[in-house]
Image (cartoon, coloured by chain):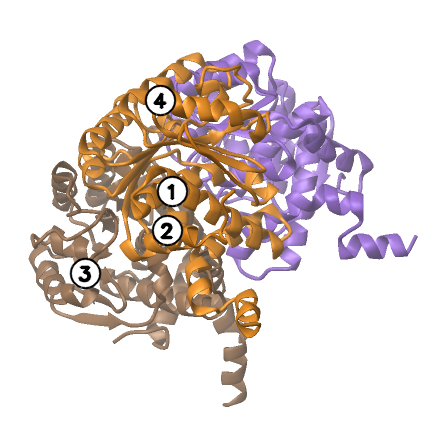
Chain colours: A purple, B brown, C orange
């Protein structure tokens, strides 16, 4: 069990802002704006997209990289492979987000699997995606999952051990495993599934946190726990899904200052009680 | 005249959430995020974009499809044709949004017209676009209309009859026709024209509603009436155009729960008066 | 020194709404949505993207054009060149936003420089970008700047004189020069650097203002001063970066009505004191 209450999580998140990592990613145009704003809210500097020689120069020079495979909708397969290969060869940590794998498109699925050759540091997705990627039954419906994250727990641990990467599954409870350890991150808000790109943006944040903590497992935990608490705080003060998305970015941008400066009502109450 | 007050409209909208249709679309990257969030707010599951073999597998397996022809800015003509053809051959209802047709780009216009071969279930646009598509004078200025929706009424009915599709024109009053019947949907908010992608997102919502109601005409009416009331509620509690866009998504996500649970102030007042 | 308090600035901004310019642009898919919404908030009509023959017909017919070179991530080099060439040959004013030039990708940088052949009316960017484009040391980190705008002042004036364009550098203080005059625009809000696409959207607004004022230098000043005051007002009523972005668009959409109708609290107080 890991949460925002853990000092190591708060420290790891704060380190993103202190180190200001340059995080380069290929993602799809639906999720790109939210992903960039989530990275900026955390204190990272994002660059996104396959423009000219960015695909070879940026992943080599970046602090961390993430690839959302639905970026195929505006970049060709060779660009995705070039980014993955360059990150791998440069020793730059990179996060794979296999969006909609297992949802019924076999050529796409085969391409997504081919990227495992370049040894991602972290793979994150929903339960349908991770079960499908691990070779289980394909259960997705477009980009949505049809199974609960708990269904993926056993698969996640075995898959992580098999491929030597950290695997993180998002759901009502998130599960993160490096093959030997599996931690749960509870919390969040159901509306995370009703905001497009919220999962993808978590992949971007994970890349930043892996750099900041210097560890793939710890980075994945930090990103998921920070996201969960930001979603809870956003959910507590909004009703609809539009306001929730805006508030999610707000809360991510305020996590460190609220923590450090005790400026949030909860923090003030916490301080008064000490 | 149709509005949110009609039981059939409220029922049709609620059915989107109950059935959770998988709605696949090609749209442009300016409108994609809002379109996906509108679908999620209504309870549909969106997938967007021409990534690998999605263009043949997803429209065949989807509940409904929509094509915004400005998606040509990141997908090639063959992808758009493949999606339209696959939906048509699979009997999947699909919505055509001929963005900026008639605005002065003849090759683009010719391509848009060529998609009519694949028999869209619904065509939606502003007055300039629909008049141009029906063969009238081209009056657009980029993606904006220069004429009022009422100017399009006669054209809309004749065009619907000619091509055997439902035609819906957005404006201060929306007009929806299947060639024999034409209904008016009043309401909305002027700021719908000041939020980029608001019209495109209505096309996506229309696709979801056509599946949910099982009828192209009824689906188009449901989507337009729900959008109009959500825009009115959003407009009543915001001033600027940024907040309005956020509130529009909020209201779409709350329409059913406010209705069912009597959680809105209006609903509570209505209940108290019974 | 120029600010929103200058009558010419307020008049210039109001002229955007009165003339409703059709502004065509190529930008990247991260910034496209905000750019379009900023233009709509100011009263301009945007069209974005390289769809079919838009790249030759739209820049010829548009009131003004802007090109964000990171649009290479979804458009090819020839499309960008076609838009720039067409605008140049039609005498349509156009704004160049050399995103991330000097950040370590030499082929991309060379392409960006090649567009100067088509004589942009205004070039806008952050300090790193403009110093790099002017031939100085490359100091960027992805799309972020690593130097303050004041470092670019000398370079900006000399570069403007050399290439015969207005050059505008964004930062804590913005500097705008036509080679003989350099004005400062103070104000704004630090969170402008934490909202993706905020700089790009300023490029789009600059294009609209150049058309509205009929002058590249005056247009650049109007757009930067309006943006600065909108950011200040947005910053005063929000805490996180998500709400700030929404409020920025709000304030841009309300600048003219607040001014004309005295509907803002500040304006009402000002009126009462007269």
Q: Are marks 3 and 1 in contact (CB under 8 Å)?
A: no
Q: Are marks 2 and 1 in contact (CB under 8 Å)?
A: yes
**B33 vs A125: above or below:** below
Which residue position holds label 2?
C12
Name the secondary structure under disc 1.
helix
- The residue nearer to you, when weighing B235 against B211, is B235
Of marks 4 and 3, the one in the foreground: 4
On residue B147, the disc is: 3
Q: Are marks 4 and 3 on the same chain?
A: no
Q: Chain of mark 2?
A: C
Determine the CA span between mark 1 and mark 4.
Answer: 18 Å
Residue farthest bottom in this picture: B274
Q: Quadrant of residue A92?
A: top right
Q: Are marks 2 and 1 on the same chain?
A: yes
**B47 vs C236: above or below:** above
Which residue position holds label 1?
C218
């Amino acid at each position: 069990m890991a949460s925002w209450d853990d000092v190591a999580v708060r420290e790891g998140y704060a380190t993103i802002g202190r180190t200001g990592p340059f995080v380069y990613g290929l993602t799809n145009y639906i999720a790109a704006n939210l992903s960039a704003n989530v990275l900026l809210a955390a204190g990272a500097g994002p660059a996104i997209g396959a423009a000219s020689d960015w695909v070879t120069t940026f992943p080599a020079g970046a602090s961390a990289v993430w690839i959302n495979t639905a970026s195929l909708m505006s970049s060709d397969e060779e660009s995705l492979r070039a980014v993955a290969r360059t990150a791998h060869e440069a020793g730059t940590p990179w996060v794979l987000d296999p969006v909609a794998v297992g949802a019924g498109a076999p050529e796409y699925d085969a391409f997504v699997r081919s990227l495992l050759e370049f040894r991602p540091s972290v793979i994150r997705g929903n339960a349908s995606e991770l079960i499908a990627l691990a070779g289980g039954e394909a259960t997705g419906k477009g980009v949505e999952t049809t199974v609960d994250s708990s269904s993926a727990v056993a698969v996640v641990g075995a898959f992580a051990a098999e491929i030597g990467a950290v695997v993180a599954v998002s759901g009502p409870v998130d599960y993160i495993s490096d093959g030997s350890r599996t931690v749960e991150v509870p919390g969040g808000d159901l509306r995370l599934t009703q905001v497009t790109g919220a999962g993808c943006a978590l992949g971007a944040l994970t890349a930043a946190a892996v750099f900041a903590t210097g560890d793939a497992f710890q980075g994945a935990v930090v990103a998921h726990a920070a996201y969960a608490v930001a979603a809870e705080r956003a959910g507590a003060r909004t009703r609809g899904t539009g306001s929730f998305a805006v508030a999610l970015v707000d809360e991510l941008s305020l996590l460190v200052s609220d923590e450090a400066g005790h400026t949030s009502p909860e923090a003030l109450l916490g301080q008064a009680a000490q």
